[in-house]
Image (cartoon, rainbow, N blue to C red):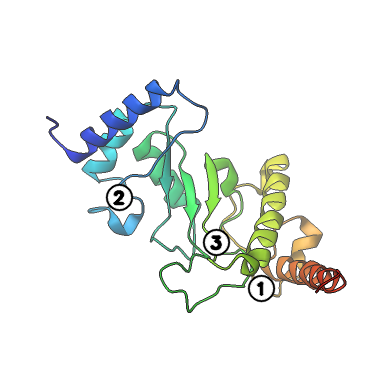
Amino acid sequence: VFPSLAQAQASVANEVYQELGQPSVFLFCPTEYCSSLCSPSPSQSCYLQTIGQELLPGIGVIWTGPKVVSQELSAALLEEVEAVLRRRPVIWDNLYANDYDCRRVFLGPYMGRAPGLMSRLHGLLLNPNCELQANFIPIHTLGTWFWSELGSCAHPDHAGMEAVAAPGDSQGAQDGSYSPQEALELALRDWVAEINQQALEPGR
């Protein structure tokens, strides 16, 4: 019936989206959802070009970055993806995901995301550790990153800067930029306080 997989997927997604009354949040995960799955690249992928052309503009498209689990997200990559999809992507961030190897637990701060990215995104979803309690630091530091992004939106002179504050950089709190090390220390202080509070509860 359809000349390509992309046209089939876009047609079905459009029909469901319209049948549901075009909800404000409707997400589509493409078969090529990261750069490493695109051939030869996101901007030259016939599949993504078709998705961008055929998918109704109100439908959000999920993207994980250069890889399924991306250590870094750059503004240049997001610009390329936005151009081919004809919309800002929704990042499905697998930085902390461990469902593919439950022997691993990721407890570090949210990092590797260039400052000013929020203005280039339609949304951001965090795929956490499978172990609920292990996600305190990931979610806490994501919140700190988010507040710094709001600050960069309020001060557009800082938006789009590619440098990410390195761990141990004390400049973060002074100039409003995000420091992974400071975010980690803040999260650890709050986590210890919460653990101590739980220890005082009856029956603990």
Q: Which residue: 74% across, 67% down?
A: 187
Q: Which residue: 42% across, 31% down?
A: 59
Mark 1–mark 3 CB contact (< 8 Å): no
Q: CA distance from mark 1 to mark 2?
A: 33 Å
Q: Which residue: 86% across, 70% down?
A: 202
Q: Is residue 165 visible?
A: no
Q: CA distance from mark 1 to mark 3?
A: 21 Å
**Image side of residue 98 versus residue 3, left or right:** right
Rendered location of residue 81, percent (x, y): 39, 44
Q: Secondary structure at mark 1?
A: loop
| Among numbered discs 1 and 3, the one appearing first in the sequence | 3
The residue at which mark 3 appears reads as 128
Q: Secondary structure at mark 3?
A: loop
**Residue 110 in the image: above or below residue 116:** below
Amino acid on which disc 2 is placed? Glu
| Among numbered discs 2 and 3, the one appearing first in the sequence | 2
Q: Residue furthest bottom?
A: 103
Q: Work out whether residue 82 or residue 100 is closer to the camera in this orientation and state it.
A: 100
- Rendered-image quadrant of the N terminus: top left
The residue at which mark 2 appears reads as 32
The residue at which mark 1 appears reads as 167
Amino acid on which disc 3 is placed? Pro
Amino acid on which disc 1 is placed? Pro
Q: CA distance from mark 2 to mark 3?
A: 22 Å
For mark 2, does the 10 Å Cα neighbourhood hold few (<14), some (14 to 19), or many (20 or more) residues?
A: some
Rendered location of residue 169, percent (x, y): 71, 71
